[in-house]
Amino acid sequence: MAYPYVSDHEVQIVSKHFGDPKQRRVDTYVERGGYQALKKAFDMGPEQVIDVVKSSGLRGRGGAGFPTGVKWSFMPKESGKPHYLLCNADESEPGTFKDRELIRWDPHQLIEGCLIGAYAIGAQHVYIYCRGEFFEVNQILARAVEDAYAKGYIGKDIMGSGNDLELTVHQGAGAYICGEETGLMNSLEGRRGQPRVKPPFPAAVGAFGMPSTINNVETLCAVTHIVDNGGEWYRQYGTEKSPGTKLFCVSGHVNKPGNYELPLGFPLTQLIEEVCGGMRDGNALKAVIPGGSSVPIINAEEVSRCNLDYEGCVEVGTMLGCASVIVMDETTDVVKAVRRMVDFYAHESCGQCTPCREGSAWTAKILRRIEDGRGTEEDLDTLMQMTQQMVGTTICVLSDSVAAPVQSSIEKFRDEYLALSRRGERVGAA
Amino acid sequence: MSDIPFKNPGWAGNTGEFDLTEEQVRGDDFVGDRPKHGGHASGAGTLPYMLADKHPEAALFEGEYQERFEKILTRYPTKQAALLPALGLAQEIRGHVSPESMDRVAELLDLSPAYVRGVTTFYTMYNKRPVGDHLVQVCTNISCNLAGADEVVDAFLRYTDTELGETSEDGKFTVIEAECLAACGFPTCVQINSRYFENVTPDQVPQICEHLKSQGGE
Amino acid sequence: MADMVTLTIDGHEVSVPKGTTILEAAKTVGTEVPHYCYHPGMSSPAMCRLCLVEVEGAPKPMPGCVTTVMEGQVVNTQSEQAKSNRQGVLEFYLVNHPLDCPICDMSGECNLQDYVHAEGREQGRGREPKRVFGRDDFGGDVLFYGDRCVMCTRCVRFMSEVEQDHRLTVVERGNRSVIDTFFEEGLDGTDWHGNIVDICPVGALVSKDFLHKARAWDLTHTPSICTSCSQGCNIDLHTRDNLVQRIKPRENLDVNGWWICDHGRHNYEWMNRGNRIEAPLARDGASSRALGWKDALRGLLDRADSLDAGSVKAVASPQSSNEDLAALKTLVDALGGGDIVYRSARAEDEIPLKGFPGLARRQDLAANTTGANLMGMARVGADDATGGLDGVADYDGIVIVLGDGLDDQPESFGQKAGLYVYLGTHESAATTAADYVLPVGTHAESEGTFTNRDGRVQRFQPALESPGMARPAWLILGALAGERSGGSVARSAGDAFAALAGSTPAFSGISYDDVGSRGAVINESVSLTGD
């Protein structure tokens, strides 16, 4: 059951045990069929495991949507070097709160997925990089790992299979940019968490200079079930190009915000109206950000045409990202919302690349000035053109993420910006 | 926002169809008190390092803390990788990461002090200067913002009689804004030291602060 | 022979070894791709984003400093996209960069000025208040103006990768990031930190010694060789008003890379010393007379002829050029032969630059000890360059001193000599008894060569004008030798060097053309001594 609300539309694969504290205990987990997938994986062999995941069509659930099986197959076969599997639990994208729930209700599901993934790519050590603010979550996870070691599911000769795997939980220290794959690797190595230039890619040179693969929490949780039930089973949900289910984190002006696990391709309007109980206070819908603050904002008309899968979102001019649906009603001050998001990026920029370091701070300053009523129409042209200079010119895509809300909001809600500029009038509630 | 009444102010335990105690949601019965020596090495680097109990003059890494530090070192192929956990451990003991702490950690890990300073200042959660007993971090990012996070910040500032980032006169509170804490379904989320308070509204602020002052928090 | 890759850059076909970056490949066709964070002597983080070039078929512009060339690639550094990228990045720099040009030392040799002038926007669009960091004293010779910093992190990487003493770091992140040291530790105690001022592309890191001293466009650059030790780092002397204002290293991958140590860098003020001997002096007891050169040299030789033939005792300086030393040797032989000794200072330790093997501040603190040794001169005295001249001080024959200041010797030095000739720049107590005091130029005022510890002969050019009637030592000594022996007299430094090459096996076969601007190593069969 998804926590805190449940909907009949849900297909609960990874979120089945949300809200059940007993699920954290290793005995309960095993009773309910846990660690069977790991056993199956060992029996299949690593190549087979990768094939099963490939056949399921599972795409990375952290936002990039890259096919997981394909990513695993990039790892070298006979490198002779230690391989690492990294689990990205540094959930910091505004609007996203699924990984936190996944870890605190069902930590063993993640652990099993990590072990299966590590086995498949030939890794001996798994690092779960868990964000620093998640103190409570880290405690739950650390205790679950300890129990799994005690029962022989991690460590030497797991379940008598002859396979050795180690797992370490690594705490972050408060940096959104460490959720970027190479930023995470740098942070794990004890450096400033600044993304690296690619090439070389992580499968060649990753954590500690060794071949590494990094996967999101939700992806690895899904892997556990895919290996248990088969690739075809996963494909019965979702669409052809975006198979399976996704945890949608809905927040904002709806009656029942929370996590909902739905098949991909679910219509956005249905999500808001049926699953989430409709707009709060019956207000009209103004805008939605369907994939976390890094994707373009869509207006009410586009929402009505939007299906929530990777392709469907692209069709209406946005992206699915990590499926964090932020719903804004008519009382929303769009300029303030965009300004706050850009403030976030300016605060979190690592500062390496000139366009991002200077551009994000500059954009934030201009938006503050507009919000104060001292903006001009020229500022809007500057913002549009200047943020375009930030797209595709940097090492990572935080820079592009600044451009997305700014450009989409100026295009679709220009009158709000102009109203502030011309008359100092704010549209919507302050 | 749904307005289901709460048993305790500022947490999301019994929203929706659930009726769980705070301990059940947070897993207190499952986890309990973590031993200072870190327990199993796999999780030795993950103890909370924002505590109300601060000892700025305490020695770094003696006794059980030394044991934990050594366990942490065994989990990584390089000494340098233990830097973040080591800094967290220093902050757990002393309350913030001072230049002396940076120097000592640098010495222990064969790094230069300037390098350690560069890494420490990159991350938000390492306090570079002393803070109040309770560090109140209010998320004001987009989802919580849409639910009125600015008013919650104002309420905290008024109640503690401080400016943003300043410590109150009695040394108990420092209030800062935080970025998304990943509890967007339960706005407004406030992290106080190591603990999350969810669904916080301005009128709950006095209650929360009194609770902290009386129990000491964690 | 490495595999070669052929590609097209701006319409020119280029063939370079596999593994070359686009930026380096572009250099071979004379295209300088603007860049900040890239430096050939350090790692490439590809973070300034100024070197983005358009590569046909690539979805995004590629950073030229790290993208390796591929067969058949078509690269365009002057396309609309590439230019607009650069214009964009330059605009981003100017958003927070203060308009300090009128008070900034870098003005006139500043990359930001040059790039913006060439390709920047005509009008700025930034209207917001700029972020401010203020001025920070990093210790040593370095001042840091944080507002001007473009965060290329060359300085951080130099200290951590080349000097391998990680003293600098980036503090904070995003637009709040700034370069700093570990609080008060600063750069004190490091020996190569002056190089970070050279590699800083803007005026964020400046030399305290050079602060507000001279404008870059007033300076004349003259290639020279550092004389602080036997490494022989290639340098440029920057002069104005006939004074050396500062020293900068000159690139030579075989000797010093792009670097120079702080000791050498700041050892130039002696070249500006005034109060020079400005005319040949003839002494007779307590009185001195200034003479013209012809009279002085004739008088000197007449005096030498009047003495009984005996061997000559000469004192040379290891800071004299090969040409000067060779001419001295020729003269000593022409006067009947004799011993030539020299004193040189030695440091207790070497100070290597760990990240550039083969480069160090050497224990031998003179530029041409190797040259002196190859010509058969012997070292005497202590490591602080004193003493060792007992045999010479009371000698009753011919005594010739070239270049050695004799600051430790008493007034009675050379009193008993039949003929005591001193060639140098300043008088001291020990020149009181000299019969002839002849003014010579410093190496900064002459053309010539030094031989470094690895046997590399390197040329230096005159950067200053000699005062008064001072002349190069090789010319004076050569003229005397020519008169005495009847041989030809070298009229140019090149001729003087050719004479050396003809007479000394180690230098045979080398001419000034061979030495060029990079130096030439002497014949290997000759062994080298000293360091």
Image (cartoon, rainbow, N blue to C red):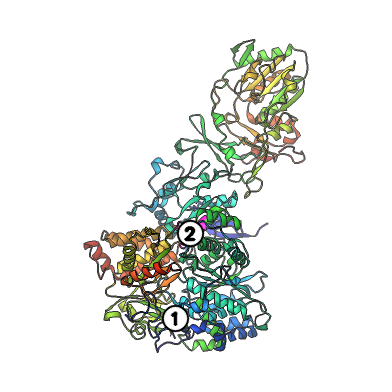
Where residue B133 sits: x, y (%)? 43, 62
Q: Which residues are magenta?
A: B117-130
Judging from the image, mark 1 belongs to the subunit labelled A
Task: Identify whether A242 is placed above or below A191.
Answer: below
The kind of residue tagged 2 is His
Viewer-side residue, A330 vs A379: A330
Q: Is residue C279 left or right of A344 when viewed as pictured?
A: right
Q: Is residue C371 left or right of B119 when viewed as pictured?
A: right
Tell me the element at label 1.
strand
Where residue C29 sits: x, y (%)? 54, 52
Residue linked to disc 2: B96
Task: Identify whether B65 is placed above or below A327.
Answer: above
Q: Dot 1, crowdedness within 10 Å: few (<14), some or many (≥20)?
A: many
Q: Dot 2, crowdedness within 10 Å: few (<14), some or many (≥20)?
A: many
Residue located at (63% from left, 28% from top): C492
- Between marks 2 and 1, how big is the CA–CA gap? 37 Å
Judging from the image, mark 2 belongs to the subunit labelled B
Where residue C216 sits: x, y (%)? 46, 38
Q: Which quadrant of the view contains residue A208?
A: bottom right
Marks 2 & 1, CB-CB < 8 Å contact: no
Task: Identify whether C116 is placed above or below C331.
Answer: below
The kind of residue tagged 1 is Leu
| In the image, residue B121 lies in the stretch drawn in magenta | yes
Residue linked to disc 1: A247
Q: Nearer the viewer, mark 2 or mark 1?
A: 2
| In the image, residue C10 lies in the stretch drawn in magenta | no
Viewer-side residue, B210 vs A189: B210
The quadrant of the image that shows the N terminus of chain A is bottom left
Q: Which quadrant of the view contains residue A424?
A: bottom left
